Amino acid sequence: MSQKPFYVSTPIYYVNDKPHLGHAYTTVACDAKARFHRLRGEPTQFLTGTDEHGQKLERAAREAGMDPLAFCDMNSAKFRELWEKLDISYDDYIRTTEERHIRGVQELWRRVEAAGDIYLGAYAGWYAVRDEAFYTESELTEGPGGAKIAPSGAEVEWVEEPSYFFRLSKYAEPLLEHYEKNPNFVQPESRRNEVMSFVRSGLKDLSLSRTSFQWGIPVPGDESHVIYVWFDALSNYLTAPGFDENGVREGSPWPTDQHFIGKDILRFHAVYWPAFLLSAGVPLPGQVFSHGWWTVEGQKMSKSLGNAVDPHWLIEEYGVDAIRYFLLKEIPFGLDGDFSHGALIDRINSDLANDLGNLLYRTLNMVKRYREGRLERTPSGDSEAESAFCEFVADAAMKYERGMSATHFQNGLRAAWEVISCANKYIDSNAPWALAKEGEEDRLRSVLWHAVAAIRVVAAMISPVMPASAQKIAAQIGLAEDWANAPYSELMDMRRLPEELVTSIGAPLFPRIEDEAKEAIQEKVARRIAGGEEAAPQEDVKEEISFEEFQKMDLRAALVLEAEQIPKSKNLLKLTVSLGGETRTVVAGLAKHYAPEDLVDRKVILVANLAPAKLMGVESQGMVLAAEDGEHLLLAGVDETVTPGAPIR
Ligand code: ME8
């Protein structure tokens, strides 16, 4: 019998909007895990896709004036397009509007029904369309204007309609038993505890169908109902590899070994999903790994902040692998974290350019200089230093494997960086330049060969996270195109580097981002947060907005009280402006166009309700308007007699 593939999945994303950084995060993590298993030579199945039914989708399509399916086609394609750019190696992509899925969902329904777990009733209660979730009164809080708000922040609405229910209450005990017997079923541990206490507090039956809209899969035998979108969506993991009237397809990779999800959808995956499967008599998945939540520049992700971390833009600005690396290195997988351009640039400069890039560059440079690019193994040149080095790397390889297997990407990457730093030290203390000078040919060859051997191990280690860079490194050290297909144990063993190689130096893998470029990026970030950047600034044609949209902007006349250059910044000025009753600190990219003293006492126009943003360590509480006139920036003016704080309409 052939080995069951290691089967990993991402959530299937809602196509009511385009993909954002959060979606990219889960998908990159899942990709790294899939690639790690492939690196180990295991057959692997990686599933992603899009969630296309439900009330949220129906509404979004209506607002866009589109037929729901055409709307889904359009947005589902945007996810695929991003995955392509992000080097996502999925094996299958499921859309819930596909026939194979619809058939499977209806079959799962029938099995749950046959188990006696579905009954007809009526639902009267709260529903959040944004989450596609039901909430009880006690879970809600009061929002602005008396609106009722779910714990997720979504607004709820009252729903009263006939509904089929799932006997979720019946599954509390079996679920608890499953969590007890399978301590890794929910990870990380803190999430497992959360799930267990939720289940212990008692489960209520779950509304499993809706009648007040059409866009969904019809309930078998009662077409006046559509199946609850979460029952529909969760089934994707089972329907994609094949599930129908004959059950789980023979040879299917089911059950999923690891579901990657964000903490927002933990309850659906760790409680409802296994309960549906228990009821239908289908084997349960191995693990639900729930990761944390990203904030952006210290704030909760929103439309405008999302714009400042638009994955397409990030890729353009920094390159795919830098983004992939940052996402998996910056925070322990499972915890929350903050995405900031400053932190990303620091990581690129220190970890990628300085540590990794420099190791590769200096090593290959010496191979070129002293050996005309040729590497040869010379055991006669080995000394104790070489065995110590090889042992250190073997040790790091074990840490790497432990980290990656446990989905602790940070630990895995840390082990790779231990090898990098050890290699850099090895070069320093064995000084090939001195060996060359002293004519110690054998030692010289051996030291260079060992340095490159360590680089190959690093390339293998980073390949799940930075596949393109790993490939480039391999090419520069002279390995064959299919080098990564070698057995895993060989890839992790320095001594298994081919005895002879011809190296070639390529373009720097990760160019440093110098201060000036960093500043330019920070300015773009501020503009993107303000919403101006996405529509190309040179073109005057922007999307039409309504008067209501225009009115959302709080424009005010402001008086500049103080202006000073921000230390280490060539572009940015820190302004203190008065709005009459209130003073604000604003960072403006005007330093190349105005001397600070020329700005004092000037009246300017301030966007006063712009979300605050940190630029070069200073929090900017608004934006000063200026005209972009070719190369020049000229302040937008108001009559000098205006009172500071006066609204501009
Ligand atoms: O929930 N930080 O789809 P969705 C980290 N269709 N991850 C984030 C994030 C953030 N700020 N924001 C979103 C759905 N995510 C359902 C899933 S599965 C059967 C159905 C990620 O488009 C995270 O993985 O709202 C989260 O679980 C997912 O996006 C939600 O995507």
Image (cartoon, grey):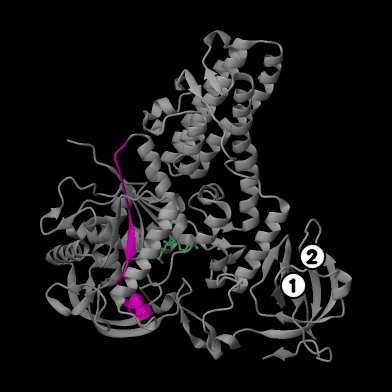
Q: Left or right of 90: which side holds 623?
A: right
Where is residue 512? Give x, y as percent. Answer: 65, 46
User: What residue appears at the point 44 percent right and 40 percent down from the top-left corner?
Assistant: 404
Residue at the image point whose x is 39% and y is 42% from the top: 35
Q: Residue at x 36, y 28 (%)?
A: 487
Magenta stretch bounds: 42-61
In the picture, the quarter occupied by the N terminus is top left
* Residue indicated by mark 1: 633
Which residue occupies the foreground of this view, 283 or 227?
227
Residue 45 inside the magenta-drawn segment? yes
- Would you identify the image quadrant in which residue 521 lies? bottom right
- Three-letter code, disc 2: Lys
Q: Residue furthest front?
A: 630
Query: 10 Å neighbourhood of mark 2: few (<14), some, or many (≥20)?
Result: few
SS at mark 2 in the image: loop
Horizontal side of residue 544 vs 588, given as left or right? left
Task: Check if mark 2's residue and mark 1's residue have beta carbons within 8 Å.
Answer: yes
| Residue 290 is at least partly visible in this image | no
Q: Earlier in the sequence, mark 2 or mark 1?
A: 2
Compared to 349, does 317 lie above or below? below
Judged left or right of residue 642, residue 74 is left
> What is the quadrant of the C terminus in the image?
bottom right
Q: Is residue 87 magenta?
A: no
Amino acid tagged 1: Leu
Is 278 positioned to the left or the right of 633 in the image? left
Q: Quadrant of ligand 1?
A: bottom left
The residue beneath circle 2 is 592
| Disc 2: residue Cβ within 8 A of ligand 1's nearest atom | no
Closer to the camera in the image, 57 or 261: 57
Query: Residue 283: x percent and y percent?
Result: 22, 51
Secondary structure found at label 1: strand
